[in-house]
Image (cartoon, coloured by chain):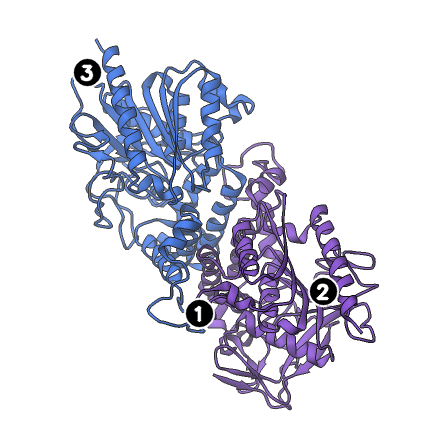
Chain colours: A blue, B purple
Amino acid sequence: MTVVNTPDQLPSAPSPALDTAPEGGHSKRALLGLDAPLQLDSGALLGPLTVAYETYGTLNATKSNAVLVCHALTGDQYVASINPVTGKPGWWTGLIGPGQAVDTDRFFVICANVLGGCMGTTGPKDLNPNSCKPFGLDFPVITIADMVRAQAMLIDHLGIDSLFCVIGGSMGGMQVLQWAAAYPQRVFAAVPIATAARHSAQNIAFHEVGRQAIMADPEWREGRYLDQGTRPRAGLAVARMAAHITYLSEPALHRKFGRRLQARDRLGFSFDADFQVESYLRYQGSSFVERFDANSYLYITRAMDYFDLAQPHDGVLSAAFKGTKTRFCVVSFTSDWLFPTPENRKIVHALNAVAANVSFVEIETDKGHDAFLLDEPEFNRTLTGFISSAWAARQKTMP
Amino acid sequence: MTVVNTPDQLPSAPSPALDTAPEGGHSKRALLGLDAPLQLDSGALLGPLTVAYETYGTLNATKSNAVLVCHALTGDQYVASINPVTGKPGWWTGLIGPGQAVDTDRFFVICANVLGGCMGTTGPKDLNPNSCKPFGLDFPVITIADMVRAQAMLIDHLGIDSLFCVIGGSMGGMQVLQWAAAYPQRVFAAVPIATAARHSAQNIAFHEVGRQAIMADPEWREGRYLDQGTRPRAGLAVARMAAHITYLSEPALHRKFGRRLQARDRLGFSFDADFQVESYLRYQGSSFVERFDANSYLYITRAMDYFDLAQPHDGVLSAAFKGTKTRFCVVSFTSDWLFPTPENRKIVHALNAVAANVSFVEIETDKGHDAFLLDEPEFNRTLTGFISSAWAARQKTMP
């Protein structure tokens, strides 16, 4: 598939019909791939393309203080500032900001919406220059490596040769690993959090349930819902509900909700939300629909399913990191059953096998996979310590 | 709600419009509640009602050798004989039959389709005598205790005073616990397997996802799909897919499928089933739709959600078993994350607290919750040993 936009048919044009318009309107935008399109893993060419991003802090004179933050499946570039769609604070304000673990008084922090996303970076809801309609399923299937290629184009565009640190959790962690493997010279330090070097069969299965829920919704219209003025709300909400359970842990659900009943002191003997956990899940589903594009959900889950960093190396993960000089800090959480500690430990073992500089911390928490987004003091201390010492080392290497 | 059928409006009449007609056509049927309707936990009255059941072996002269098998959420009465809908062997032929752990040369085995089911026992697809249309959501919400009440009516109907053993896994195990708590004099031995004395918040959440998937399907028609000639196939398939993941374990999925690709040696860069695990899940969804009624799925999952054996005793589970003389064998499986060992151990602790006769076995397996349906030699040996020794004890008590 070749999808090359001509400069007068730019995918940064406003998308039609998405009634909640999660356009990431306040973001900076870079128009990239004007000289040469992005070559995707599928063989398709995509370009020019728009990457929407936020920055915090100031790039120093030597351009040595840039930190790239990679977001998760349903995350976005608003890592440390108000999200204009939801009006909520950034998703990592506990870690990124003035005086925080990633101190924006010291570092220049960049966070870009991923390729295939729906917050301003080119994705399936943008106009296909060949048809002048939204791409829908004509958007090429993308991979984590493709997302990282688009980010590398952005970093080039910003004139940054080498990143001080790349950091991210979950799918963000996959991007961190891909950065370290694909651009070892450009990554001084890397923090993959609650992630895996390849998506497990169980995780592929959960993603497939979500995709089937979306595609079963007649309002999905084979992906052409934007042209046809519909939205697969019900299907996307079910997908989100199923996924949301996997982000939590049984102990966290038990602590938060247990079997407590919803605004009644007895069972309702109906299919209304009797239990608080049902009401909570329904809210998670319905609020997600207001901010996320269903086709983006298909494409991004597919990219995660396809991720297998060892595959090009005949299954030998360490080969992906051969000769690396990057400093790594791998973090997992005890109650995370989506990306459990053994998956993270495999990354550590592969790095050990090539004598990389790696530290590994497993944080004790009952909060499940979502712990990486929540206030976890030990996680915060781990990051603060690693970033400080890596920054000290970085400064020694500078002229 | 009062739903009392008059004898000339029997719910055993054939249901209309269910095109695959999972009617359990070969089963024995008992018409119960003719004298007095079944009083449900919701307050509704239901009756007369039909219970469809299978039996294996011969009831002895003293009626002391009856074993009641309780089936799980999507199970049925065909525990040890060919299922007429699927054409497949019974779901526990590895445990129940001549010379098996539950030896049908020695025992009279009874297995009934649960109340609310779709294999011949009265459920939401049967005719509502008040409207002469299928009940749909006019069927009263039922509980595990209601299912057990209907079974007790069947056992009365068969002239059996006391069951030698009640056995079941998952939701079947909930029924076993309910039998032991509600009818302690009628249960000599009880084998709850891979179950819990109350449904966890996480399990309620997974059920809610399944129900929302069904109810989001426009073909569900607010539960009136049988009248309207539709079927919520897509929604029910998604519900089954999500549930099916919870029946397995990550190691089992990894062993069975890993990241192996489906009939191709490379990624397809599409949303077709690329991975074998996706194809398997899709098959699980689509084949389930051929044999199960969507409204039954709603009612039975709701019954499980409502199950909390300690609730009537101010949360003190042991009080449910006070004074019990039943012999218990509680079984769990190491890789079962739906009904994990700690949930089963809570049952054991409650039984210990009332000095009950209880043995507890945790079986080492990577097969997940489904292990109770699969060939597990240690599980088989455990059951064989427990049943033999309980039968020896039973015979000593007989005149």
Residue A55 left/right relative to A262 = left
**Mark 2 element type:** loop
Residue type, label 1: Phe
Depth check: give the residue in front, A355 or B221. A355
- The answer to the question of whether label 3 and label 1 lie on touching residues, with beta carbons closer than 8 A, is no
Depth check: give the residue in front, A257 or B326. B326
Check disc 2 and report the residue beneath it.
B78
Check disc 1 and report the residue beneath it.
A271
Q: Is residue A236 above or below residue B40?
A: above
Residue B134 left/right relative to A328 = right
Mark 2 to mark 3: distance in Å?
A: 75 Å
Residue type, label 2: Tyr
Mark 3 to mark 1: distance in Å?
A: 62 Å
Earlier sequence position, callout 3 versus callout 1: 3
Check disc 3 and report the residue beneath it.
A62
Q: Is residue A348 above or below residue A6?
A: above
Q: Share a chain, discs 3 and 1? A: yes
Q: Chain of mark 2?
A: B
**Mark 3 element type:** loop
Image coordinates for residue B79, horizontal then vertical, percent = 72, 62
Q: Chain of mark 3?
A: A
Residue type, label 3: Thr
Image coordinates for residue B292, horizontal then vertical, percent = 61, 64
Residue B12 left/right relative to A30 = right
- Which residue ends up furthest to the front in the rendered image? B355
Image coordinates for residue B354, horizontal then vertical, percent = 56, 63
Q: Chain of mark 1?
A: A
